[in-house]
Image (cartoon, grey):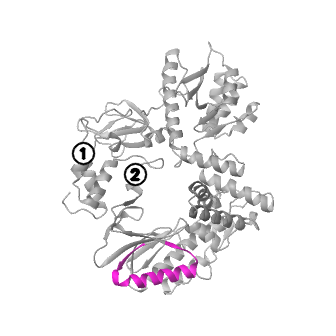
Amino acid sequence: MKPTTILDVEIFRNWFAVGMLDVGDGRVDFLELHDDQPLDVDRLRYVLDRNRLITFNGDGFDIPIIHYALAGATTQQLHDAAGAVINQNLRGWQLADRHGFKLGKPRDHVDLIEVAPGMASLKIYGGRMHSARLQDLPVDPNDEVSPTQRVVLKAYCENDLHTTRDLYETLKPQLELRRVMGQQYKIDLRSKSDAQIAEAVITSEVTEAVGTVLRPEIAPGTAYRYKAPDFLQFSTLPLQVKLGEILDAEFVVKDNGGITEPPALAGQTVTIGAGVYRLGIGGLHSSETCQSVVADEEHVLLDRDVASYYPSIILRLGLEPAQMAGGFLRVYQSIVDRRLKAKAAGDKVAADTLKIVVNGSFGKLGSKWSRLYSPDLMVQVTVTGQLCLLMLIEALEAEGIRVVSANTDGIVIHCHRGDVGEMERIVTDWEQRTGFVTEETSYRALYSRDVNNYIAIKPDGGVKVKGAFAPPGLMKNPNSEISTEAAIRWLRDHTPLAQTIQGCTDIRKFVVVRQVKGGAIDQDEKPIGKAVRWYYSTSVTGPLRYAVNGYTVPRSEGARPLMELPAEMPPDVDFAWYEQEAADILAAVGGFNGLV
């Protein structure tokens, strides 16, 4: 089995280095180029040809720079090229054309930057994964470096290599799904995002069915009108008027390929019962704030989500990109059917891989760089989605059944137990008219800061959280997680806040990670980098500040930087700060009663 090597480069005017971490034994090695050291091109070529390479933004940066170095570039030339890639957004092939070298491609290379969700820097991903050490570049990238600084920079690069390895280990399930799919479709999908995979797979199957598919060219200024399906009908005059306004509106293609939101949608709201609903290209959103709704002896609280809403709209309305006419719908329906069959058979790998294709395809309808690009279809999907939900809400509220929240693909209903049968009849009728299917989840209580940030307690004690209350992960920075956990335990079990917070000995649950543009300095004016991790301390006064202008970093009063995670809980954690934060969360979601 070939070795797996994490690879990263460092470039300065008088020094170039390729850092390599062997995933198998953890050994780190460097190949260097400077005045006293020629680059070992034979060994570097061997690594590129014989190892499985793992990089973060390797396709966009490291690999083109390495091939320029293999072509004989000096450290100054490599430094200038790196600046062009970063500052001019130069692609690898453009760099190769400009400098006359051959841009090779490693035989076995995985670039993690597209696989990782959230489009963050490597340092921020490190903070989200609780990597042991966060470190910014310790030397100005435009400086020449001394032999002593080379040692410091190699330690910095080694830390980046370890952070990349952390990301590689975290993404292994996603990479395995991509490997399986790649074998099936004979396409290397390991370095692609979900949306890129969807495009590659669908395009491959459509090409096989109808021939070559080209990326469409749609001129800015092209206008589309929304076409409502026959089953979309409203009973009340205000919604009938709103539908008419949307049908008359023009959706115009912008220079970047996106769609201009017409006045009929932009900033518009509709009122149904006690609910106020915001319209927009992005989907339907209700407008509740600081809302707590509880099921009791007289009422049930039910979440009805539409299963695979956008894919279902595509198939129900027969939406097919013009450049894929005659093939797309057959292929898309086949993928949906194969996924359902795999899911029913318990074939989780097949079901999960096909789910990536089904759900990842929608976003490409709005990307002018995609062969799936169809802005008119994106309008059809998103507008149909929100209008159909409004149709369901209208029918429920007409019978006095209260809808307490709505968001993109589902609604939450607070219903008198005596009206459950009528509620189910209305939902079933809506499903039969539209062809969509809803899935029901019961809640014991729903606590909402707003429609995008809530805590829902299930009857069995399970919890569904969204937005600010969701746990940290690759898409979300840690932010005093223990305070949210304490608030949830209070809402669910009435566990005192202090018991949860003071009983926790995991410092990772107390940290905050934040991107600070231009870098931050601590209370002693010591630079601490652009990706900053801290906890709130009883022994620190004052905030962190932006290095560039001295402004306060938001919510950093009393913050002690924690760029290296300690083995033990620090003795100066300000538990009172975290208890107050938990109390503020409860107040924001309407769950505070003074007994915390």
Relative image position of residue 173 (x, y in whole percent): 54, 47
* Residue 114 visible within the image: no
User: What residue does disc 1 label?
Assistant: 503
**Tag 2 residue:** 471
Q: Is residue 505 above or below residue 1?
A: below
Q: Quadrant of residue 514?
A: top left
Quadrant (top left, top right, bottom left, bottom right) of the N terminus: top right
What range of the chain is rendered magenta?
Answer: 412-438
- Sooner in the amino-acid sequence: mark 1 or mark 2: 2
Element marked by disc 2: loop
Q: Callout 1, which amino acid?
A: Gly
Say which of marks 1 and 2 sits in front. 1
Most distant residue in the left direction: 595
Q: Secondary structure at mark 1?
A: loop
Q: How many marks?
A: 2
The percent coordinates of residue 463 (x first, y second) are 36, 60
Cα distance in 3D space between marks 1 and 2: 19 Å
Vertically, is 397 above or below 12?
A: below
Q: Residues within 10 Å of mark 1 (few under 14, many from 20)?
A: few
Can you see residue 576?
yes
Label 2 amino acid?
Pro
Tell me: 36 left or right of 393.
Answer: right
Residue 455 appears at what percent x and percent y?
A: 36, 61
For image coordinates 37% across by 55% down, the residue present is: 469
The label number, if any, that marks residue 42 in the structure image: none
**Relative height, residue 281 to residue 569 (above, below):** below
Taking the spot 60% from the left edge, 37% from the top edge, the residue there is 86
Tell me: 457 left or right of 199.
Answer: left
Dominant SS type (magenta)? helix
